[in-house]
Amino acid sequence: MSRNQPVQLHSHTLERVTLRGAFQAALPVLETGKEPAVAFLYTPSRFIIARVQDRNLTDSGGNAVSCEPVFEARIFNLQVELRWLHEGEGVGAAVLVSERAGTAPEWSPEPAWTPATRDYRGFLKNRYLLWGQADPAGVLGPNAPHWTPLSESCVGRIDVPLCVDPGQRVVLETREYLEVIAPHGNVVVGEERFLRFTPYRAGGAGTMDRSRGTDKAGAEAPLQAGQGQEVRDA
């Protein structure tokens, strides 16, 4: 499904900030919405899915996740996405991306976030189908009502912050923003924003599935753990 009307993406960037610092500053907007924000955290040894809970990042066991080993993070809800990339000595660049203007978090007394706006021709609604089905035998501890283990023999198990029925599958919803490349007028995907996990429901005629292992930035998104397929709805 697509929307051809022009759309703007508003970003706010901060340089040389720790992941913890960027996360704490962005909490006012990350905690908006009915659903807790989801975090994809990349470390040298593993890929972690967490969620924002009690002003912290927690895993499926209800444990706080340390930001120290993380070299890349994407924390998102339906309204906004926070991205952070380590550059050295524990600090990196953070950017907050949203279709809504005025989402810059307060940052005092540190330097202000730098705002920018970019115009796009429209967007595509996209879904990544995660590997694995909901495992009825999974034991997730105190956060069990909010998490579901997905399992597949070829990739093992991954816990996702979503309640689904045994045997059901899960998709990651995203939004791809389209821009025109001069001088020939070709339309390409210039940006992608992660939105949320939802239960998988097969599309109607015209649905297209294709293998997908990396996101637009080249990072192995659930991608590493979910090893999904891209599902497009006509």
Image (cartoon, rainbow, N blue to C red):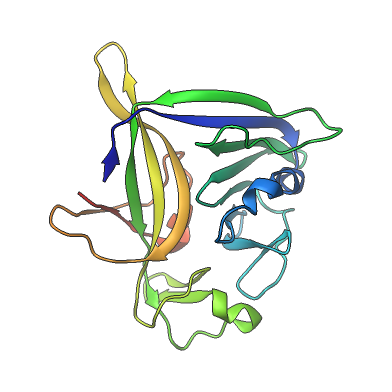
Could you tell me which residue is drawn at 36 percent across and 27 percent down? 6
Could you tell me which residue is drawn at 63 percent across and 25 percent down? 115
Front residue of 89/107: it is: 107
Please give the count of numbered marks on the rendered protein.
0
**Residue farthest to the left, as pictured:** 205
Q: Position of residue 179 (x, y in %)?
A: 35, 26
Q: Viewed as shown, does residue 42 lie left or right of 164?
A: right
In the rendered view, tell whether residue 152 sits above or below residue 66.
below
Q: Viewed as shown, does residue 50 lie left or right of 208?
A: right
In the rendered view, tell whether residue 82 sits above or below residue 204.
above
Could you tell me which residue is drawn at 48 percent across and 24 percent down? 118
Q: Position of residue 114 (x, y in %)?
A: 67, 25
Q: Is residue 220 visible?
A: no
Q: Position of residue 194 (x, y in %)?
A: 47, 48
**Residue farthest to the right, as pictured:** 109
Q: Position of residue 221 (x, y in %)?
A: 47, 52
Front residue of 207/210: it is: 207
Q: Is residue 171 visible?
A: yes
Front residue of 76/215: it is: 76
Could you tell me which residue is drawn at 67 percent across and 73 percent down? 62
Q: Quadrant of residue 116?
A: top right
Q: Viewed as shown, does residue 137 lie left or right of 208?
A: right
In the rendered view, tell whether residue 142 sits above or below residue 15.
below
Q: Viewed as shown, does residue 213 lie left or right of 108?
A: left
**Residue farthest to the top, as pictured:** 183
